[in-house]
Amino acid sequence: SADPKLSLMPWFHGKISGQEAVQQLQPPEDGLFLVRESARHPGDYVLCVSFGRDVIHYRVLHRDGHLTIDEAVFFCNLMDMVERPPGNGTGCWGSPPWGWAHGCPTILQHYSKDKGAICTKLVRPKRKHGTKSAEEELARAGWLLNLQHLTLGAQIGEGEFGAVLQGEYLGQKVAVKNIKCDVTAQAFLDETAVMTKMQHENLVRLLGVILHQGLYIVMEHVSKGNLVNFLRTRGRALVNTAQLLQFSLHVAEGMEYLESKKLVHRD
């Protein structure tokens, strides 16, 4: 099972001051960095980079729903700004509107090759105290899947935070939810970490997660869809009393299992 306190952004220190960021980036180490919320400009972020004996602070600006430091390279969100994705990650260059043929580049990928608009190449993230890297821990626990093995298909549902797509993973039919917002993805990661501990025949099984442009949650595909829609689209002539009792029993068994784990279902 995975640790329920994993962080998608262990390098994100939240609401700390510039001086606190300087203290976190001690002793000096060229390329050591963290990201914090901007105190002067609420809603913006600051990339703090150690170089020489100094810490340089770069404001991360919001531009048309994307993030940029120099208004030349743009990123989807904080995770895409810092984490290295699979593949070459090129694209997103120049002024809006952008072409997204190859997905977003990352600051780490871009500035680890060339310092560009910042003082030095980014080398190592400074993790917030008490956090664990989701990527490292999920990989260690066997829950991190490979994006290259995932094929996405048609939309089969719509959740509060995005579409649910049908897909295949290594030949197995799956259902995939992709959450791109940083904060929402972190909340779903917390829930997913709990799901790694759940094993019951009446619960939809988690197969794993993929960290790329947010969070992909990969689950077993239920061919007949969710039970509510199944019942609503069929009359009593198609669903008899014995089937209804069986459905009720299976739901009760699943809920009893969740209760035994001291968990409450979202719905």
Image: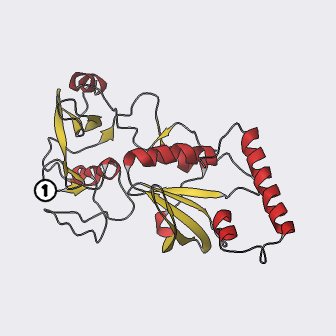
Q: Position of residue 53 (x, y in %)?
A: 17, 26
Q: Name the side, left or right, on which 163 lies relative to 256.
A: left
Measured along the vertical axis of the image, is residue 20 above or below residue 234? Answer: above
Which color scheme did the rendering employ for the protein? secondary structure
The N terminus appears in which quarter of the rendering? top right
Foreground residue among 193 and 166 = 166
Mark 1 neighbour density, 10 Å: few (under 14) some (14–19) many (20 or more): few
Task: Tell me the residue that label 1 is attached to.
Answer: 72
User: Residue 22, how many percent across, how many down?
Assistant: 24, 25
The residue that appears at 47% across and 68% down in the rendered structure is 148
Residue at the limit of the structure toward the right, as seen here? 242
Residue pictured at 83% horizontal, 71% vertical: 240
Q: Secondary structure at mark 1?
A: loop
How many numbered badges does the structure rendering display? 1
Q: Amino acid at mark 1?
A: Ala
Q: Is residue 13 left or right of residue 263?
A: left
- Residue 71 position, x and y percent, is 13, 53
Answer with left or right where residue 197 lies relative to residue 254: left
Q: Residue shown at 29%/42% (left/top)?
A: 123
Q: Position of residue 10 (x, y in %)?
A: 40, 38
Q: Quadrant of residue 161?
A: bottom left
**Residue farthest front in this picture:** 236
Q: Could you tell whether 123 is left or right of 162 in the image?
A: left
